[in-house]
């Protein structure tokens, strides 16, 4: 019989709806049940496209003997980390503290009042499985016995962990602000961690180095950026047939990927490719950028014009069984079936294919560069591959991840003078405003026709950033008004009076504490993005409140910035702008953006960090009433006039008419 998860909309939760485990979703009813039964809570956190989440489900949660122990001795709760990143963030700190590492699936043992007393990630099912001394089955029994027999010890442990969490999320506002030395410190750290052979940071597994790339590009270390981006795009991390990047590689040479594809990775990597192209003027990076955007439009864009979350690592193989990477890898026999002997030989020259590099199959690696012979081969392989069963697509719509995609398309539309890309960004924005936005408040996700859950900090900060990018490209005052409304909501419900912003709204009553995210990992933290937003808004309006709020973030993060600057890769990128404000270019024009000579001139002479704002002359008065672009003063009322201003924090010079 289906369990309670059958009533949910999350693809991850629905994957577990037919487990013999009596799963609850995260809800107060579950914890009340645990109190009434006087049993601990088993909390399992993951996401729908996670390979090892699938493995643990198959090995343990589908096993009737293990499920029996879970049901009799625990209240079991499943959480989709993408729906509830605030819950995920809190308990990830526990896993990292207790194990020295993190990851998914996350597995935690809690008291009925949500306090953890033991934690880990993936557990093999039985003693001896995958080389484990103690398997999940026996751990369940040991910890239940400890909960029953050593109640005081469990309570003491859970209280100590709660105190640790409270210390971890506590921030102290520094009187002083960081100084410019932190930029040099971060630069030195990145250089010491840099993998000169493969790009990225030393060692494996290797995750896309998106945020450090932007920082290094800003500092002028183009060779480090090019080496990293080129190695990622030419090796196994990249899907050479259909475009788009996989989640990460298990080795240091970007060879063997975990095959899931995430919207946020590809949106951020599109940004990196765009910035690298604009700085280097090398067409290769533009080609990879266009490949990514084409992939996102083809595979991740809904009929309503909004982006889905991810595609799975696993898919059905020729035997009808789920297998990691089955959609993406090739046997020698398959290549011989699809290609001629000459085409296979051409592939050997384009790719490193001297050995079967993934469980007796090929993953395409290291393109030798542009090769006109590759395109017809690619089309044949794509046609064959498209006939395979595709990986599951998680059709959850997340505001934060869509905002990253909106920014990528909006920026690409501006830089490449492509109105269609801007149109994609605007359509996705319209969907969010229609379905996930109410009076300054954002919802977190949208599935099966319904908005769900309170937005968290990254939903607000990422979406404000996306709207600023769209405002830059369209000059629409409506976007700026929504930006103001979202900032007001953040001020009321998320901002800490001591500086910075909490992860969850003050109305979130179902978490044991509210943390302040600052670590820039696979995704930038909400505080880092909001710092950038506030500095952009200060530059636009000269409103000192925006500067004060931005400096509030710096004050609470001063210690972290000085001691661990590489943990704040995105913030460091825009901290450079704080110390050395870039010039913003404001074009006031009635012409279409793709015809504007000022737009063309800006990107031909692009300087990283500068912002371009394209404003319709008819909207200048409206924007001025909102304290936006007030510094522009009088503008020409002549039809088709175009004026260009160069501005630094409110001080503007009319460059030319």
Image (cartoon, grey):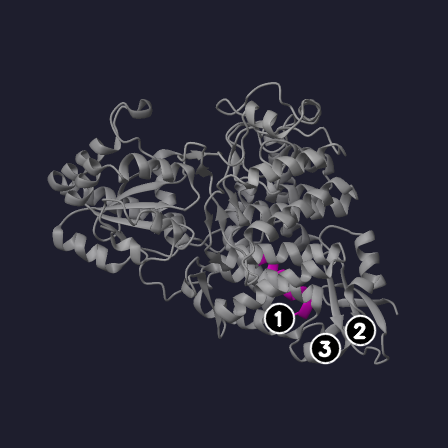
Q: In which quarter of the image is residue 539?
A: bottom right
Q: Is residue 556 left or right of residue 351?
A: left
Residue farthest to the left, as pictured: 149
Total marks in image: 3
* Mark 3 closeness class: few <14, some 14–19, many ≥20 residues within 10 Å: few
Disc 3 target residue? 619
> Separation of disc 2 and disc 1 at Cα?
18 Å
Disc 2 target residue? 590
The first of marks 1 and 3 along the sequence is: 1
- The disc at residue 630 is none
**Does 111 appear in magenta?**
no
Q: Which residue is drawn at 64% across and 52% down?
A: 574
Q: Quadrant of residue 347?
A: top right
**Marks 2 and 3: which is nearer the front?**
2
**x and y percentages locating residue 21 in the rendered image:** 23, 45
> Separation of disc 2 and disc 3 at Cα?
10 Å
Asked if disc 2 and disc 3 are in contact, CB closer than 8 Å, the reply is no
Q: In which quarter of the image is residue 447?
A: bottom left
> Separation of disc 1 and disc 3 at Cα?
12 Å
Nearest the eye: 596 or 111 = 596
Numbered range of the magenta stretch:
531-542
Disc 1 target residue? 479
**x and y percentages locating residue 30 in the rendered image:** 22, 55
The first of marks 2 and 3 along the sequence is: 2
């Amino acid at each position: 019989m289906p369990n309670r998860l059958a009533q949910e909309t999350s693809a991850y939760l629905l994957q577990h709806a037919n487990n013999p485990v009596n799963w609850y979703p995260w809800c107060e009813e579950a914890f009340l049940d645990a109190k009434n039964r006087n049993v601990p809570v088993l909390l399992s956190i993951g996401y729908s496209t996670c390979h090892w989440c699938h493995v643990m489900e198959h090995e343990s949660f589908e096993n009737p003997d293990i499920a029996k122990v879970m049901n009799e001795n625990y209240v079991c709760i499943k959480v989709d980390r993408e729906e509830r990143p605030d819950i995920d963030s809190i308990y990830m700190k526990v896993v990292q503290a207790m194990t020295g590492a993190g990851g998914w699936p996350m597995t935690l043992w809690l008291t009925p009042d949500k306090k953890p007393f033991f934690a880990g990630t993936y557990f093999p099912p039985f003693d001896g499985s995958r080389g484990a001394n103690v398997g999940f089955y026996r751990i369940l029994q040991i910890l239940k016995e400890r909960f029953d027999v050593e109640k005081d010890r469990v309570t003491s442990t859970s209280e100590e962990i709660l105190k640790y969490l409270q210390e971890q999320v506590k921030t102290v506002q520094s009187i002083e602000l960081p100084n410019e030395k932190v930029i040099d410190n971060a630069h030195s750290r990145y250089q010491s961690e840099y993998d000169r052979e493969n790009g990225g940071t030393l060692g494996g597994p290797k995750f896309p180095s998106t945020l450090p790339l932007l920082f290094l590009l800003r500092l002028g270390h183009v060779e480090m950026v090019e080496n990293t981006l080129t190695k990622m795009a030419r090796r196994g991390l990249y899907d050479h047939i259909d475009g788009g990047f996989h989640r990460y590689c298990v080795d240091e040479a970007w060879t063997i990927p975990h095959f899931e594809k995430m919207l946020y990775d590809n949106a951020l990597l599109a940004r990196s490719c765009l910035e690298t192209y604009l700085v280097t003027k090398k067409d290769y990076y533009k080609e990879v950028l266009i490949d990514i955007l084409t992939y996102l439009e083809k595979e991740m864009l809904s009929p309503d014009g909004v982006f889905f979350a991810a595609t799975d690592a696993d898919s059905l193989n020729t035997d009808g069984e789920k297998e990691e990477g089955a959609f993406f890898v090739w046997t020698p026999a398959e290549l011989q079936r699809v290609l001629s002997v000459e085409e296979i030989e051409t592939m050997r020259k384009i790719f490193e294919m001297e050995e079967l590099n993934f469980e007796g199959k090929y993953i395409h690696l290291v393109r030798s560069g542009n090769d006109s012979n590759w395109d017809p081969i690619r089309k044949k392989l794509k046609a064959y591959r498209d006939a395979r069963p595709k990986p599951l697509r998680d059709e959850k719509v997340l505001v934060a991840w869509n905002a990253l995609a909106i920014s990528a398309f909006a920026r690409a539309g501006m830089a490449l003078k492509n109105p269609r890309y801007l149109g994609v960004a605007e359509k996705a924005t319209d969907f969010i405003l229609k379905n996930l936005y109410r009076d300054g408040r954002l919802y977190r996700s949208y599935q099966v026709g319904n908005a769900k859950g309170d937005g968290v900090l990254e939903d607000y900060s990422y979406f404000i950033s996306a709207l600023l990018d769209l405002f830059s490209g369209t000059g629409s005052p409506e976007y700026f008004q929504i930006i103001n409304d979202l900032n007001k909501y953040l001020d009321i419900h998320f901002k800490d009076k001591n500086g910075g912003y909490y992860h969850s709204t003050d109305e979130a009553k179902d978490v044991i504490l509210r943390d302040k995210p600052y670590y820039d990992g696979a995704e930038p933290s909400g505080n880092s993005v909001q710092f950038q937003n506030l500095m952009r808004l200060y530059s636009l309006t000269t409103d000192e409140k925006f500067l004060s709020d931005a400096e509030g973030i710096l004050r609470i993060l001063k210690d972290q910035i000085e001691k661990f600057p590489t943990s704040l890769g995105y913030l460091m990128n825009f901290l450079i702008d704080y110390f050395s404000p870039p010039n913003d270019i404001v074009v006031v024009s009635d012409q279409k953006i793709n015809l504007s000579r000022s737009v063309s001139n800006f990107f031909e002479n692009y300087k990283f960090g500068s912002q371009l704002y394209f404003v319709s002359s008819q909207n200048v008065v409206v924007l001025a009433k909102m304290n936006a672009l007030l510094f522009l003063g009088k503008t020409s009322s002549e039809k088709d006039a175009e004026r260009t201003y160069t501005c630094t924090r409110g001080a503007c010079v009319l460059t030319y008419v």
